[in-house]
């Protein structure tokens, strides 16, 4: 039954090819015939106009006719229609009409009054079409409708035989009338059908040849498609589904046996693969999460965020079926690296905005407080209040030594971070080496890098809290120093430090994000640095402009202390260099 359905399906396709070929041939024949008919009609019309003009010129050149028209065109001459119907002008016109087969040969005087007409009853009347062109000395051809119907007609002037004699030029002779000759439309097109017979015959022969060729092609097509193997049909369907479902994005398709059958250029770029088609998934260097999704036997669709090298990818995996047959799984990869970076920058900007709003409100409150103290004469208390503001900054941020940092952007940003850290029980303080004389010109890069380092440090400080009964409050210290357009950052925490064998800047797939954490969860509950993509992302942002982010000191018990002259141990020390961040 399956073979019968496949054969009928292929026959329908072959029939469509046959019909398409016939339609194309018939359309070409019809178009060619229409062009020929149009060209032939134009040729016949031009020939009829030329013939009418030649006959009119011949009749107008007859000396006897010119003499009679000259005599009849003299002012005051009595025109008797009865005499004109039997006169020499009418006879000359009728003779010309009989010889040439024209529809009419009409002769008028210099006023447009008919001197000769096929219908004798119309002699002596004004012509139905304007004689002005001919009476002004111009020859004209046209298609027009007169008393005898539509015709191709020519009008030429009749020159008199007066001054200058017979041999005088036309310019010296007056126009005494006109000759109008016309050919009926039926007479013009009477050879069109006869001329079209060869074209129609050739078109029918062409259609017949096209039918024969189409039938032969159809038979050959049927014979060729019968040789297609089922495996090739599966690959064809799978390739089609993959391409249609992943245009413009990375697409990788895997057969039910686990072999890669499709991998477009974008997928190879995102996953850093070289010639993956035909290889097993287990033989490729794929992220563990992606490999597991592609190897999964279940048909349930799956979506996940996967880190592959320097890229953060959103992966959608779907199973492909056709007529109940499992064709494998297809993964669509979308690059979200820039989106992740932008999200982190927006988070930092949001925190900064809230801090600036609170700073404005608090600053106004403090100005009111100072003004009130001065109004009541409490100058000493006002001075003490101003000293406290100088110590802690214009806003009562829980940031120790906030007066060491005067750059507005960094002051507000670190103030906001200080509020977040204080809510988690961590003290944020500004180091003694802090000195920023310039102005931040790249706030997005600064907030992303510095924000990630501070968040990591806060999490690390909390992980080391409670290690000993006499341990002080967890703390994080930040030092910021500018050198020309370069901004140097240093972040140290009171945590347990970083194990020497841990690669902090390796990409890891993000999991559920904890508040203030780097970027995700970790299978190791004791690990606090390098949980996700925050540190690698910070390093990449810094390196774009020639800077860098690195681990200066892993820290830990037995370390050199916090650098302030006491014996307090410290955790990891991270440093960053941002080029072009200060102006």
Image: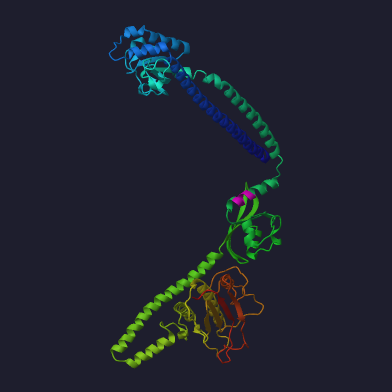
Q: Is residue 13 above or below residue 476?
A: above
Q: In which quarter of the image is residue 21?
A: top right
Q: Foreground residue, 88 or 290?
A: 88
Q: In this view, does 239 lie above or below 461?
A: above
> Is residue 251 inside the magenta stretch?
no
In the visual, does 164 lie left or right of 545?
Answer: left
Q: Position of residue 187 (x, y in %)?
A: 47, 17
In the visual, does 247 lie left or right of 92?
Answer: right
Q: In which quarter of the image is residue 387?
A: bottom left
Considering the whole magenta stretch, tell me its main secondary structure. Answer: helix
Specify the farthest residue to the front: 164
Residue lying at 50% horizontally and 72% vertically, measured from the top left:
442
Q: Is residue 174 above or below residue 539?
A: above
Residue lying at 38% horizontally and 88% vertically, measured from the top left:
386
The magenta stretch spans which residues?
Answer: 238-243
Q: Foreground residue, 6 or 115?
A: 115
Figure quadrant of the N terminus:
top right
Q: Is residue 472 above or below residue 507?
A: below
The colour scheme applied to this rendered structure is rainbow
Q: Foreground residue, 546 or 57?
A: 57
Specify the farthest residue to the bottom: 380
Q: Can residue 130 be seen in this view?
A: no
Q: Where is residue 112 in the image (x, y as percent from the top left)?
A: 33, 18
């Amino acid at each position: 039954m399956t073979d019968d359905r496949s054969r009928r399906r292929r026959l329908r396709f072959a029939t469509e090819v046959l019909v398409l070929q016939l339609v194309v041939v018939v359309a070409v024949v019809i178009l060619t015939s229409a062009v020929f008919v149009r060209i032939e009609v134009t040729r016949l019309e031009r020939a009829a106009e030329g013939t009418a003009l030649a006959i009119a010129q011949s009749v107008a050149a007859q000396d006897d006719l010119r003499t009679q028209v000259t005599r009849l065109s003299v002012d005051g001459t009595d025109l008797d229609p009865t005499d004109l119907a039997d006169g020499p002008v009418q006879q000359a016109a009728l003779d010309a009409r009989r010889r040439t087969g024209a529809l009419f040969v009409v002769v008028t005087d210099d006023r447009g009054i008919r001197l000769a007409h096929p219908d004798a009853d119309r002699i002596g009347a004004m012509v139905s079409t304007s004689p002005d062109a001919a009476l002004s000395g111009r020859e004209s051809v046209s298609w027009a409708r007169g008393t005898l119907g539509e015709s191709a007609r020519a009008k030429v002037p009749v020159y008199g035989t007066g001054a200058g004699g017979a041999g005088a030029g036309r310019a010296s002779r007056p126009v005494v009338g006109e000759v109008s000759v016309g050919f009926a439309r039926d007479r013009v097109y009477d050879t069109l059908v006869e001329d079209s017979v060869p074209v129609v015959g050739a078109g029918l022969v062409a259609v017949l040849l096209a039918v024969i060729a189409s039938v032969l092609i159809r038979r050959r097509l049927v014979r060729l498609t019968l040789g297609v193997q089922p495996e090739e049909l599966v690959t064809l369907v799978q390739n089609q589904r993959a391409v249609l479902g992943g245009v413009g994005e990375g697409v990788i398709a895997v057969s039910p046996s686990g072999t890669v059958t499709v991998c477009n250029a974008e997928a190879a770029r995102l996953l850093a693969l070289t010639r993956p088609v035909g290889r097993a998934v287990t033989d490729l260097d794929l992220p563990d999460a992606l490999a597991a999704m592609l190897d999964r036997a279940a048909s349930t669709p799956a979506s996940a965020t996967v880190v592959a090298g320097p890229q953060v990818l959103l992966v959608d995996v779907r199973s492909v079926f056709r007529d109940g047959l499992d064709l494998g799984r297809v993964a669509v990869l979308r690059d979200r690296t820039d989106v992740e970076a932008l999200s982190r920058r927006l988070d930092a900007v949001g925190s900064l905005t809230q801090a600036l709003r609170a700073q404005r409100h608090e600053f106004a409150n403090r100005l009111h407080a100072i003004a009130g103290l001065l109004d009541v004469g409490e100058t000493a208390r006002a001075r003490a209040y101003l000293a406290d503001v100088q110590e802690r900054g214009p806003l009562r941020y829980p940031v120790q030594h906030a007066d060491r940092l005067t750059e507005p952007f960094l002051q507000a940003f670190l103030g906001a971070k200080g509020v977040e850290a204080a809510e988690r029980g961590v003290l944020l303080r500004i180091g003694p080496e802090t000195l920023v004389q310039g102005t931040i010109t790249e706030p997005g890069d600064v907030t992303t890098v510095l924000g990630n380092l501070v968040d990591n440090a806060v999490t690390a400080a909390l992980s080391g809290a409670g290690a000993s009964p006499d341990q002080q409050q967890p703390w994080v210290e930040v030092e910021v120093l500018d050198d020309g357009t370069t901004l140097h950052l240093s972040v140290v925490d009171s945590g347990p430090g970083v194990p020497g064998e841990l690669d902090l800047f390796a990409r890891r797939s993000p999991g559920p994000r904890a508040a203030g954490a780097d970027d995700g969860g970790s299978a190791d509950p004791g690990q606090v640095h390098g949980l996700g993509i925050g540190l690698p992302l910070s390093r990449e942002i810094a390196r774009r402009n020639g800077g860098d982010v690195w681990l200066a000191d892993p820290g830990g018990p037995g370390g050199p202390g916090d650098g302030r002259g006491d014996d307090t141990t410290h955790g990891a020390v991270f440093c960053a260099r941002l080029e072009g961040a200060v102006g």
